[in-house]
Image: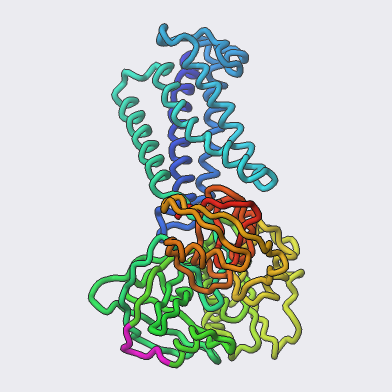
C-alpha cells in the first residue's frame, strides 16, 4: 500500500466534508426562506439538507481517522479531540490555533447534528440557537483549511476554496435578505389572511363563473391589461377589495403554473356579513375588481408524509397542495361534508387520486368520520381546514408541532379579557396614549395616527398584526396559538389587550 494513502484520504475527505457543509447550509437556507418557490418542495429540501449534513459529519470522521492512521502527521487521539493539544503547525505565528479550530468545529457539528435529531423534544429557541452555530462552523472551517492545509498553493484548491467561500457568502446574504415569514395557523371567516407587507392593488377581470357545488361558485380572474400574474404557491390566497368597502380573502385553488389566471371558490354563507353574498350576487363575467396578493400563510412544511383533513369549503387551500406534491410523497386526504352535492371539486379530486382520498358525506355514511382510526400510528404532518368542531377534534388528538390549521370563525375568549386601561407607545410614530378599559386597542391606535389595516374585527383574519417590542399582550384572538404569537412577538389589536401596564408597538 502507498505509504501516503492516508494523507491523500485526509486531504480528499477534508475537501468533501467542507463542500457538504456549505451545500447543507445553502439547502437549509433555501428551506427556511423558500427563495426557490414555487420550483421547490419542502420535503426534498429537508431530505437533502439532513442527508448532506449527516454525510459531512461522516467525512469529518473519516478525515480525523485518516489523520490518526497517517504515519507522517501522526495525530494522537488527544490531538484530534482536545483543542490546543496538537503541536502540528503550518504557520508558526499562529501556533496551535488552526488545528484547535478544526477540533472546535467538530464539536459544534456534533452539537448541531445531535440537537437536530432531538429537535422534537427540545425547546424551540434552544434548538435554533444551537442550529445557528452551523454558520460559524462553515466560517471557522474556512480558516482551519487555509491555515493548516497543505494544498493551499495548488490552483485547483484555491479555485475550490474560493467557490466555497463565495457560496457561503451568497447563502448568508440570502438568509439576511429573505427571513422566514412567521407561521400563521388560521384564516378569516370567509377567506385567508392578507399580508401586511404589501397592499398594492391589481385590477383583474372576471373571465369565468362556474358552479362547482351546491352554494359554491368558482371565479376565474385574468389581468385587465396584458401581462402575466404574480407567482403563487399552494396555500396562497388573494384579497378581494369589494366595491361595498369590504375586503375578503379567498384561497387560490387553480394551477400555480398558470401565470395568466387565478381561480377561487366561494361558498355563499348563510351567515354572510356581506362578503360572500356580494360576490355571489354581483360578480359577473367581464366585471373588473381590485385584488391584492397573492400571499401565503398556510404553506406546507417539510414532511415525508401528510394527512389533509378538509371540511366543506376548507378543501380550497388544499386542492392545490395535493396537486403540487410529488408522486412519491405519501399523503391521505379526508374530505368531509354534508353531502357530495355540497362538496366542491369532490369528483375531480377522487378521479385524480382514487387511492389517496377518503370521502365522508354525512347523508351517505352518517355520523362523524373516525379520526382516531385515521390518526392511529400516523406520525406525519396534519393539515386541516374546516368548521370549528372538526378543528377542535384534531387539536385534541394531534400534538401542536404536527398540526397546521385554518379557522372559519373566532374562538370565544371573552371570559379571558382583562378590563383595565393601559399605556401604549407607538415606537416609530413617537406617540403615547392611554387605552381605556372600554375601548378597542385597534381603535385607539388608529385614532392616534397608527393607521392599521383591519378586516374581520374578530381576531380571526390576522390583518391587523402588529409587532410587540415591549410589554405583555393578552391574546384574545384565534389567529394562532398564544405560544407562537409570543415566540415571534406579535399581537392582533382588534380584540387583544395587555396584561402589563404598558405596551410598546412597532408602528
Identify which residue is drawn at 49% across, 67% down: 463
Magenta stretch mostly in which secondary structure? loop
Which image quadrant for residue 452?
Answer: bottom left
Residue 210 image position (x, y, % from top left): 43, 89
Left or right of residue 229: residue 351: right
Front residue of this view, candidates 230 and 446: 446
Residue 417 image position (x, y, % from top left): 68, 64
Residue 229 image position (x, y, % from top left): 32, 70
Tell me if I can see residue 306 in this picture: no
Identify which residue is drawn at 47% across, 90% down: 211
Is residue 121 a member of the stretch shown in magenta?
Answer: no
Q: Which residues are magenta?
A: 282-288
- What's the colour scheme? rainbow
The single residue placed furthest to the left in the displayed view is 226
Is residue 284 a member of the stretch shown in magenta?
Answer: yes
Tell me if I can see residue 385 in this picture: yes
Identify which residue is drawn at 55% across, 63% down: 441
Front residue of this view, candidates 7 and 339: 339
Q: Up-down: is 22 above or below 77? A: below
Q: How many marks?
A: 0
Residue 336 image position (x, y, % from top left): 65, 80
Amino acid at each position: 500500500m502507498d505509504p501516503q494513502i492516508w494523507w491523500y484520504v485526509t486531504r480528499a475527505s477534508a475537501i468533501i466534508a467542507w463542500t457538504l457543509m456549505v451545500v447543507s447550509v445553502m439547502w437549509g437556507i433555501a428551506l427556511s426562506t423558500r427563495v426557490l418557490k414555487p420550483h421547490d418542495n419542502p420535503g426534498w429540501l429537508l431530505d437533502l439538507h439532513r442527508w448532506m449534513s449527516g454525510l459531512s459529519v461522516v467525512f469529518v470522521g473519516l478525515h480525523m481517522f485518516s489523520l490518526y492512521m497517517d504515519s507522517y502527521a501522526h495525530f494522537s487521539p488527544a490531538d484530534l479531540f482536545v483543542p490546543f493539544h496538537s503541536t502540528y503547525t503550518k504557520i508558526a505565528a499562529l501556533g496551535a490555533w488552526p488545528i484547535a479550530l478544526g477540533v472546535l468545529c467538530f464539536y459544534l457539528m456534533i452539537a448541531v447534528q445531535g440537537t437536530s435529531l432531538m429537535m422534537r423534544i427540545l425547546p424551540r429557541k434552544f434548538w435554533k440557537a444551537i442550529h445557528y452555530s452551523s454558520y460559524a462552523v462553515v466560517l471557522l472551517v474556512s480558516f482551519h483549511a487555509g491555515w493548516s492545509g497543505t494544498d493551499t498553493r495548488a490552483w485547483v484548491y484555491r479555485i475550490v476554496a474560493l467557490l466555497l467561500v463565495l457560496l457561503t457568502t451568497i447563502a448568508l446574504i440570502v438568509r439576511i435578505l429573505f427571513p422566514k415569514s412567521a407561521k400563521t395557523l388560521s384564516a378569516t371567516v370567509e377567506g385567508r389572511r392578507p399580508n401586511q407587507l404589501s397592499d398594492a392593488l391589481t385590477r383583474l377581470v372576471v373571465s369565468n363563473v362556474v358552479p362547482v357545488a351546491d352554494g359554491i361558485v368558482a371565479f376565474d380572474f385574468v389581468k385587465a391589461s396584458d401581462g402575466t400574474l404574480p407567482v403563487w404557491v399552494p396555500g396562497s390566497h388573494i384579497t378581494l377589495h369589494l366595491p361595498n368597502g369590504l375586503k375578503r380573502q379567498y384561497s387560490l385553488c387553480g394551477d400555480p403554473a398558470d401565470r395568466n389566471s387565478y381561480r377561487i371558490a366561494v361558498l355563499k354563507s348563510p351567515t354572510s356579513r356581506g362578503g360572500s353574498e356580494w360576490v355571489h350576487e354581483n360578480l359577473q363575467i367581464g366585471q373588473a375588481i381590485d385584488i391584492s396578493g397573492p400571499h401565503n400563510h398556510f404553506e406546507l412544511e417539510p414532511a415525508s408524509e401528510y394527512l389533509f383533513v378538509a371540511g366543506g369549503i376548507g378543501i380550497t387551500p388544499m386542492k392545490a397542495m395535493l396537486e403540487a406534491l410529488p408522486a412519491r410523497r405519501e399523503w391521505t386526504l379526508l374530505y368531509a361534508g354534508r353531502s357530495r352535492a355540497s362538496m366542491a371539486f369532490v369528483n375531480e379530486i377522487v378521479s385524480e387520486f382514487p387511492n389517496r382520498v377518503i370521502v365522508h358525506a354525512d347523508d351517505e355514511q352518517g355520523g362523524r368520520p373516525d379520526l382516531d382510526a385515521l390518526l392511529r400510528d400516523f406520525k406525519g404532518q396534519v393539515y386541516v381546514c374546516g368548521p370549528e368542531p372538526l378543528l377542535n377534534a384534531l387539536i385534541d388528538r394531534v400534538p401542536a408541532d404536527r398540526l397546521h390549521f385554518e379557522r372559519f370563525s373566532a374562538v370565544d375568549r371573552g371570559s379571558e379579557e382583562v378590563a383595565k386601561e393601559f399605556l401604549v407607545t407607538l415606537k416609530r410614530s413617537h406617540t403615547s396614549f392611554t387605552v381605556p378599559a372600554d375601548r378597542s386597542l385597534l381603535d385607539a391606535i388608529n385614532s392616534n395616527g397608527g393607521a392599521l389595516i383591519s378586516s374581520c374585527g374578530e381576531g380571526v383574519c390576522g390583518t391587523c398584526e402588529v409587532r410587540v417590542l415591549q410589554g405583555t399582550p393578552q391574546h384574545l384572538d384565534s389567529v394562532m396559538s398564544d405560544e407562537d404569537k409570543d415566540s415571534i412577538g406579535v399581537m392582533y389589536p382588534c380584540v387583544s389587550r395587555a396584561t402589563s401596564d404598558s405596551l410598546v408597538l412597532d408602528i
